[in-house]
Image (spheres, rainbow, N blue to C red):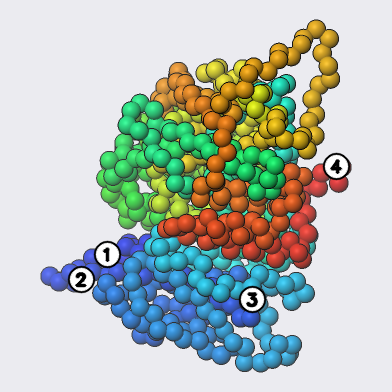
Amino acid sequence: MPAYRKHLPLLLALALGATFVVHSGAEARRVEATVIVGRVTAQGRPVAGTAITVPGRAVRALSAADGRYAIAVPRSADSERITLLARRSGYEPWQSPVTLRGDTMRVDVRLVATVQEGDSAAPVTAAVRKDIPTSPAPERQRLGDARAKSITGAVASVPLAGAGQARGGVYGAETSIRRRREPGNTEAYDRIDENPFRSSAVAPLSTFSVDVDRASYSNIRRFLDHGSLPPKDAVRIEELVNYFPYADAEPARGDVPLRITTEVAGAPWNTAHDLVRIALRARDVDMRRAPAANLVFLIDVSGSMQGPGRLPLVKQSLALLVNQLREEDRVAIVVYAGNAGLVLPSTSGSDKQRILAALDGLEAGGSTAGGAGIRLAYDVVRQNFVRGGNNRVILCTDGDFNVGQSSDGALVDLIEQRRTEGAFLTILGFGMGNYKDAKMEKLADAGNGNYGYIDDLLEARKMLVKEMGGTLVTVAKDVKLQVEFNPARVRAYRLLGYEDRLLRDEDFANDAKDAGEVGAGHMVTALYEIVRTDVPLDVTLHETGALRYQRPAAPSAPSDELLHVAMRWKAPDGDRSQLVNHPVAARRAQPSESMRFASAVAGFGMLLRNSPYSGKLAWPAVIELARGARGDDRDGYRADFIRLAELAAELSRHVAAVPMHPRPEE
């Protein structure tokens, strides 16, 4: 048995930035750690393979392909001063005094080459091709200390965490900036045709299912951090916008767990148009007092899950969640490769050592019998069902099923049958190169669930710790929105995103029609771009010709309403929906900080998609708009978005995005 396993609880505690008590005879001492994360660069380019050490401490990390590193440094006091060293062949040694405070902090490293650029002895970094410029190194700390406190998972000195892995770094040197799809890449994305403008006189209703998935954003970040623009069909605008928290009012006390907030302002990409923001905010749940959880980790251990960013990252991510469990919570582990099997029967959350040991023992190999694994996981949930509790399957996979029930249709049918048993589904995507985004989005939608993509431990920390309630506790299911536009005020409109969530207008009041689920504390935003009746029509409307028998009714006298929002929702264990109405006044106001940032993120998505509706929008305008709306940004998510927008702007000047599966007409 490896020596580290007997110390596994201590190592994991250090990895999580936790406090651990070590007993030596009658004496007990507290061991704490600060996780230092950062990026190693030289002349604006990432430097891979840089050794990060602390004199006098048995810790070491190596920077990954994009220059990211993470290292856990034990400390014996709340504040302790150390020296951080960085060494890489071909560069001058770097060192800096660091005062350890809190559980996580950021320190970026800038190296200076010992040889002139172009010298044969100059090192070649793993993540950069010299013929394609990369984004300049940040001139100041982008994420900030406040965000650092929330990302305690990324660490290099713990066996389960893997050496030198930080944001974007879990793939080692697998990728580089590239102009075209790599041979053997089988990633799959469903085609997205953006919603067009529609006439409010012909189609006054817009109906769709609420969506709280955020996988598209972290998946796009993975592409950008590894030097390429994402395929356009990987860009789902609503998932980008919904990745971020906004300063919307919480629901009032009462029976309705969702609150609607709306605002109207000018569209940044076309000042003649309006942008309407419809925001839903769900009630928060104190996870310390939440209903007991009955969780089943369903883990893909097939051969496709071998390597960095796959099964090792699954173990790290689920270890973060295990650390949050209470005694009344229970966890079982089901795995599948060629066959499915129960690795750990339902176990109390207080027995963390047993759960972590079961995770640690998993190894990848074999084919992928996903259907069998799904059936077994739902069986285990049913056997341990907690009435009134949080019964959920958490599926961790790259989606590359190839044995037994593996087609999208067969798996969707299977999950739709099992969701009636009262269990919800969370899908966490991992990996690259063979990633099946389209399949996993369909499965999550079918299973009353949500879907996220884990590109590193920082994202795992966000989903499974910071937003644990939203990920694991459903407060409203089958949530639908129907927006009716006043034809006296609105000539044309279009919904940004939600293309795969559109519903027929008659499905709004049909309680048999499945829709999206909203978790505790979740924030959901929908954006509509509208053309008012008092401005020239500058968009194309593809509508039917004149009708022979029907005659459109004359618009009613102008009212103070621009549109009306109706929402239907069900309780997590309910079958009948409830209706909430919310009229929206026609007046345009100065955009709030939330509106400005949401519109910057939507513009980011439109530029990545080369959208025909982006007007005169350009990357500098997106970046400037986001900077002006950064606000408090306690967790640093907006600062990281600004970094990605700057990187996308740089890449867009040098790298052409090529779809993973070229369309026939292309």
Mark pair 1, 3: CA separation: 38 Å
Tag 4–tag 3 contact (CB < 8 Å)? no
Alpha-carbon neighbours of circle 3 within 10 Å: few (<14), some, or many (≥20)? many
Mark pair 2, 1: CA separation: 8 Å
Total residue callouts: 4
Instruction: Please name which of the two marks, 4 or 3, marks the residue nearer to the observer.
Output: 3
The amino acid type found where label 1 is placed reads Phe
Tag 4–tag 1 contact (CB < 8 Å)? no
Residue 102: quarter of image: bottom left
Residue 298 position (above or below residue 151): above
In the rendered image, the residue lying farthest to the left is 26
Q: Residue at x 61, y 81 (%)?
A: 42
Image quarter where the N terminus lies is bottom left
The amino acid type found where label 2 is placed reads Arg
User: Residue at label 3?
Assistant: 45
User: Residue at label 1?
Assistant: 20
Q: Residue at x 31, y 39 (%)?
A: 290
The amino acid type found where label 4 is placed reads Pro
Mark pair 4, 3: CA separation: 37 Å
Instruction: Please name which of the two marks, 1 or 3, marks the residue nearer to the observer.
Output: 3
Measured as percent of width and height from the top left, residue 125 is found at 65, 77
Instruction: Please name which of the two marks, 3 or 2, marks the residue nearer to the observer.
Output: 3
Alpha-carbon neighbours of circle 4 within 10 Å: few (<14), some, or many (≥20)? few
Residue 353 position (above or below residue 192): below
Q: Residue at x 34, y 54 (%)?
A: 323
Mark pair 3, 2: CA separation: 43 Å
The amino acid type found where label 3 is placed reads Arg
